[in-house]
Image (spheres, rainbow, N blue to C red):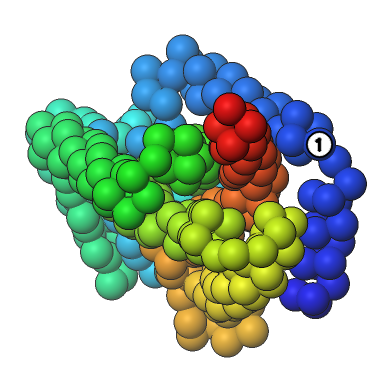
Amino acid sequence: MNLSLTEQLDSFVRKHSDRQLLILPVATFLIAVLIIAFTSATTGAPVKLGMEFKGGTMVSLNTDMPADSLKEKYSTYPLTDVRQTGSRTVMQFGPMSTEEQQTLNKDVTDTYGSVEIRQIGPVYGKDLQKQALKAVFFSFIGMSLIVFIIFRTFVPSAGVILSAFCDIVIAIAFMNVVGVELSLGTVAALLMLIGYSVDSDILLTTRVLKRRGEVGENITNAMGTGITMTTTTLVALFAMYLVSTYSYLIIPSFSQINLLSDISIVLIFGLIADIMNTWLTNVSILRWYVQKEGTKMARRRRA
């Protein structure tokens, strides 16, 4: 499968000009920006915040009551989500007053069995927001500095950074589309995505700039290795997503692992976006740069 994908992608890259290769990535990026802008305008944040970042209460319990009945019963509370995770039901509430919290805690503990209550205050949630933003920001800045140190040339380094940035933006837009909230787990997924993106882009840039031979052949060789790396990771992530999301359908005693499910689906879509941004966007930038530098060297020799 890797060979077939590599051959098709390589054929596509060879048959199209640098500008043509940029059409799909640019269109996808602009759509992602529009989605994020719409989410920011409607919710006040570029992505829907999870309980860790906005505060709230999560109640896990054993009950045979359907989700719709639970929604109706607790409709007077800021109930945001009710879902079945294996043999347990999880209800998620937004921030509420101390009186509401105490009443809710008493209600669920007196009514249901094996109740687990997890609460995060809004002040602590805002503090976590700041810490998460700092983590992503400084990780991106640190990655950018290392890339510039490695290549010491602006255009190839900018191509690596641009590809990683586009991966993050598209992954965030995808989270908004499918309803995945920003949690500590998905922040970790976005940080991992930066690393995966840089790996493939550095591989490509190193092969093109530091190996002798025709540019097209160097790109093809890098593509074979890079696509194998990415598809191998995708297979592992897809398996993790299936197990963490649907294993309870086969083994009822298992429960859905929402953290792993969210991490895996964000990484899956982010790596798919990385295939496009590395082998279309960055390839077009590198081909243009090498051709430009070759033209400059030819002019100097004639002079």
Q: Secondary structure at mark 1?
A: loop
Q: Residue at x 48, y 82 (%)?
A: 254
Q: Residue at x 21, y 55 (%)?
A: 118
Question: Is 144 on the left or on the right of 34, as rendered?
Answer: left
- Which of the 4 image quadrants contains residue 10? bottom right
Pick whichever, 207 or 89, lies toward us: 207
Height in image: 222 above or below 184? below
Q: Is residue 267 visible?
A: no
- Quadrant where the N terminus lies? bottom right
Height in image: 81 above or below 66? above
- Quadrant where the C terminus lies? top right
Residue topped by disc 1: 17
Residue 68 screen position, x and y as percent: 56, 46
Height in image: 168 above or below 208? above
Question: Is 24 on the left or on the right of 301, as rendered?
Answer: right
Type of amino acid under label 1? Ser
Residue 45 screen position, x and y as percent: 37, 24
Q: Residue at x 49, y 85 (%)?
A: 253
Pick whichever, 257 or 209, lies toward us: 209
Pick whichever, 142 or 258, lies toward us: 142
Q: Is residue 290 visible?
A: yes
Disc 1: CA contacts within 10 A as few (<14), some (14-19) or many (>=20): few
Residue 175 screen position, x and y as percent: 52, 42
Q: Residue at x 26, y 44 (%)?
A: 145
Question: Is 279 on the left or on the right of 24, as rendered?
Answer: left
Residue 157 screen position, x and y as percent: 42, 42
User: Count the marks: how many?
Assistant: 1
